[in-house]
Image (spheres, rainbow, N blue to C red):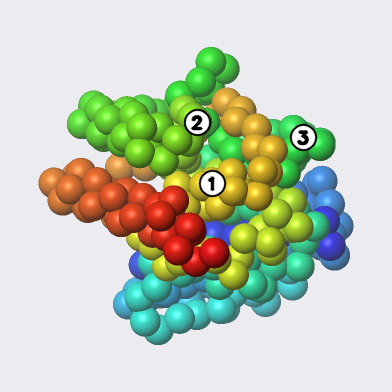
Amino acid sequence: MKLSIIIPAYNEEERIEKTLNSYFSFFNKKFSIKEYEIIVIPNNCSDSTVNILKKLGKKHENLVFKEFKKKIGKAGALIEGFKLAEGNLIGFVDADNSAPPESFFRLLNNINNNDGVIGSRWIKGAEIELEQPLARRILSRIFNLLVRIIMGLHYHDTQCGCKLFKKEAIKSILPNLEYTKWSFDIELLYQMKRINAKIKEIPIKWADDSRTHLNIAKAPMQMFIALIKLRILYSPLKFIMKK
């Protein structure tokens, strides 16, 4: 199998069917159904997300989903998706289709000799159809600055939900990934840095969806705390003591 696309889902009854139809319509023109799979990990859903997936599963045999009754969040959903993925390339996108299939296909076209390719909304060439509210854009830039300072990751957009990696890279770091919340993308990229993975950042087409689960009032402090915890988790002293 060439490709696995993972989609975390928490109460996505209003968006998941449209997103999946969009991705299946696009990738059915690029690959046979034996060459790619879409893995959806619904967790703690109290709406009709799972019923929608069951219905779509009858239509698309390369749709895989595994439900978790408890809340495992985006981090847990992606980790579980990584475990299930059979593709030589493993990527993930958000359930809201903010990164359309054309954007994900750009990642595929740029993987080449890279270990991973990540989409960016903040570098030249990005096509932003609908911008985030000003408060979220400011929060994003402040958080990005902190990521650079605290974690030493010099990417323009660590939080964009459109990433692709080679299977070998994912499997090599999978045992070390934690069920972090706000900082999962950062932990993933930091783990890639630790194994000297070659990661390329490219501009993508992207549109904001206002129906976000992000609480803008609580998010800044939660994100900062998560980043500090991650820095402590990967402190040089900890690794020295392990040795």
Image mark for residue 109: 3
The N terminus - image quarter: bottom right
CA–CA distance between discs 1 and 3? 20 Å
Label 2: which secondary element: loop
Nearest the viewer among 125 and 128 is 125
Residue 78 can be seen in this image: yes
Q: Does the CB distance between marks 1 and 2 fall below 8 Å?
A: yes
Looking at marks 1 and 3 on the same chain, the residue that comes earlier in the sequence is marked by: 3
* x 51%, y 20%: residue: 123
Residue 171 in the figure: left or right of residue 155: right
The kind of residue on which mark 1 rests is: Leu
Drawn side of residue 67 relative to residue 35, left or right: left
10 Å crowding of disc 3: few (<14), some (14-19), many (20+): few
Task: Tell me the number on the disc at residue 189.
Answer: 1
Q: Residue furthest bottom?
A: 69
Seen as rendered, the residue at the extreme left is 217
Viewer-proximal residue among 16 and 126: 126
Expressed as whole percent of the image width and height from the top left, the position of residue 109 reads: 77, 34
Q: The residue under label 3 is which amino acid type?
A: Asn
Question: Crowdedness of circle 2 by 10 Å Cα count: few (<14), some, many (20+)?
Answer: some
Q: CA distance from mark 1 to mark 2?
A: 9 Å
Q: Nearer the viewer's eye, disc 2 or disc 3?
A: 2
The residue identified by callout 2 is: 155
SS at mark 3? helix
- Tell me residue 124's x, y (percent): 53, 15
